[in-house]
Image: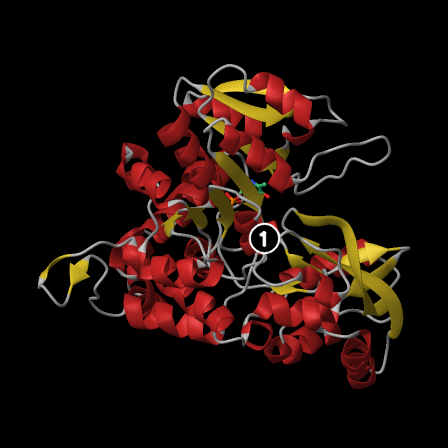
């Protein structure tokens, strides 16, 4: 009988609604969401009573309802502090945008705009023109098209140019990029017929030549982004393969992946082929991401011959994978930095890569001084994002010895904003390279919250 009594002791939703606190929640969260939370809190209490637990009091019921409201309304997509030293961290959103790119997004999104409007004629315009002029000026390509991401760019190029026809690719390049992007699968999806040449470690011009004896729609080159074959290897130069394709009248398409526009060798990394170089070597089409080494928003960019781009634009899939206005605004602003020769100063990805060990040492030391604990160690940052595998940049790390490093890492993830650090040799490590200077106060506050050694 106590169970019946306990159930009767629970207040009604109407009684809970009398609380002054609940009136405040209705102001902040709206009436229907607040009601949902109250009902859910009561339902949980009833279920608890039926399984033998005592009925919660009025205040507990309210507390639980409030907790539900907060849980439901805390965004799951939140800013974090990236202290991993991985500059293009795909899980942490890849490239942070420049101030100009952010301003362009704000301006474009807060009102109407010329997304598809021709101001001169007062008629419908084309969204594809916005970044095209900047891209062709920068890369020397005849034409360009921006789509949702590079996976879409490659799929679209194959679908529009090679459906049911042969596409020749070397076995050295049948890669899986991660996140489900596998070159053979993308080809199958597009309806193109995969023709593999060479072996896993070696491919020769003669292999391509033999495959080109039969008609083909495309010769595809895919940048092996995230892995490297070492040892007994061979791969003809891009220009040689492109020239061979051209002799047979077959378009040469390069999936470049990262799409660097600056020379990574300037920062002590090995040289990542640039878009300009690929086009100069004879690529008819080059596909790359907007948010890898380009340092812009998520996008897939196709640059190259205008007849090929025109054909791609007309394919029905182009509409399904088109870029949105925010992407085009941010991308245009990012590209402008390259044209104005200010990319290294204005684009966060290049600014992060350009930091010297001395600058990083000063930052890590300042953290140690501010906290009165921790030490500065030599370490390595990585580029990430499938760019330059195995390549590292010398950095300085802020290192903390704590009794329970995993617990400390979890606690840093609970901070607001969350801090993402890592563990090596039982030490908690933070790399200043990928921490924005304006985040340092938040970072130090999170570190102060950690228990002592
Ligand atoms: C990263 C990458 C892709 C996929 O690009 P997204 O912009 O992530 O869709 C495709 N090809 C190569 C070679 C890549 O490195």
The residue nearer to you, when weighing 432 against 242, is 242
Q: Position of residue 315 (x, y in %)?
A: 29, 34
Seen in the image, is 214 located left or right of residue 262?
left
Residue nearer the viewer, 64 or 430: 430
Residue 352: x and y in percent read: 66, 69
From the image, tell me which residue sits under label 1: 277
Image x and y of residue 289, in percent: 51, 50
Q: Quadrant of ligand 1?
A: top right
Number of dots carrying numbers? 1
User: Please, is residue 208 above or below residue 404 in the view?
Assistant: above
Q: Is residue 245 above or below residue 41?
A: above
Q: What residue is rendered at 29% in x and 60% in y?
A: 17
* Residue drawn at x 84%, y 83% as measured from the top left: 372
- The percent coordinates of residue 177 (x first, y second) are 61, 37
Q: Look at 51% across and 30% down and name the residue there.
A: 247
Closest to the observer: 142 or 82?
142
Q: In which quarter of the image is residue 102?
A: bottom left
Residue visible at 77% across and 61% down in the picture: 408
Task: Tell me the crowding category of disc 1: few under 14, some 14 to 19, or many 20 or more residues within 10 angstroms, Cα based.
Answer: some
Q: Return the residue found at the far left.
A: 122
Q: Give the color scheme: rainbow, by chain, secondary structure or one colour.
A: secondary structure
Q: Is any part of residue 182 visible from this angle?
A: no
């Amino acid at each position: 009988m106590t169970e019946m009594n306990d159930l009767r002791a629970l207040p009604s939703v109407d009684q809970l609604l009398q609380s002054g606190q609940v009136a405040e929640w209705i102001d902040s969260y709206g009436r229907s969401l607040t009601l949902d939370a109250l009902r859910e809190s009561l339902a949980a209490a009833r279920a608890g009573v039926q399984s033998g637990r005592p009925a919660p009091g009025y205040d507990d019921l309210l507390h639980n309802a409030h907790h539900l409201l907060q849980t439901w309304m805390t965004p799951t997509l939140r800013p974090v502090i990236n202290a991993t030293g991985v500059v293009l961290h795909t899980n942490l959103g890849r490239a942070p945008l420049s101030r100009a790119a952010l301003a362009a997004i704000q301006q474009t999104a807060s009102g109407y705009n010329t997304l598809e409007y021709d101001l001169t004629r007062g008629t419908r315009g084309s969204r594809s023109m916005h970044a095209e002029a900047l891209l062709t000026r920068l890369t020397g390509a005849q034409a360009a098209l921006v789509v949702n991401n590079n996976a879409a760019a490659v799929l679209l190029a194959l679908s529009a140019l090679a459906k049911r026809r042969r596409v020749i690719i070397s076995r050295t390049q049948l890669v899986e990029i991660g996140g489900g992007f596998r070159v053979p699968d993308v080809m199958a999806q597009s309806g193109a017929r995969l023709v593999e040449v060479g072996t896993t470690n070696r491919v020769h011009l003669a292999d391509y030549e033999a495959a080109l004896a039969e008609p083909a729609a495309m010769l595809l080159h895919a940048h092996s982004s995230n892995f490297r074959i070492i040892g007994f290897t061979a791969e003809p130069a891009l220009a040689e393969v492109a020239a061979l394709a051209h002799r047979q009248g077959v378009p040469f398409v390069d999936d470049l992946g990262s799409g660097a526009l600056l020379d990574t060798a300037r920062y002590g990394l090995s040289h990542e082929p640039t878009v300009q170089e690929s086009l100069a070597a004879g690529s008819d089409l080059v596909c790359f991401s907007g948010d890898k080494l380009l340092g812009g928003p998520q996008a897939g960019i196709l640059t190259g011959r205008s007849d090929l781009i025109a054909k791609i634009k007309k394919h029905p899939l182009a509409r399904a994978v088109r870029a949105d206005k925010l992407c085009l605004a941010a991308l245009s602003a990012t590209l402008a930095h390259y044209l104005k020769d200010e990319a290294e100063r204005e684009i966060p990805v290049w600014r992060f890569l350009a930091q010297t060990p001395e600058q990083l040492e000063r930052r890590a030391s300042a953290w140690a001084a501010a906290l009165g604990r921790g030490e500065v160690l030599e370490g390595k940052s990585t580029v990430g994002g499938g760019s330059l595998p195995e390549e590292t940049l010398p950095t300085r790390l802020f290192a903390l010895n704590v009794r329970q490093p995993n617990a400390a890492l979890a606690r840093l993830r609970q901070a607001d904003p969350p801090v993402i650090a890592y563990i090596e040799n039982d030490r908690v490590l933070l790399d200043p390279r990928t921490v924005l200077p304006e985040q340092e106060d938040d970072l130090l506050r999170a570190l102060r919250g950690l228990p002592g050694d």
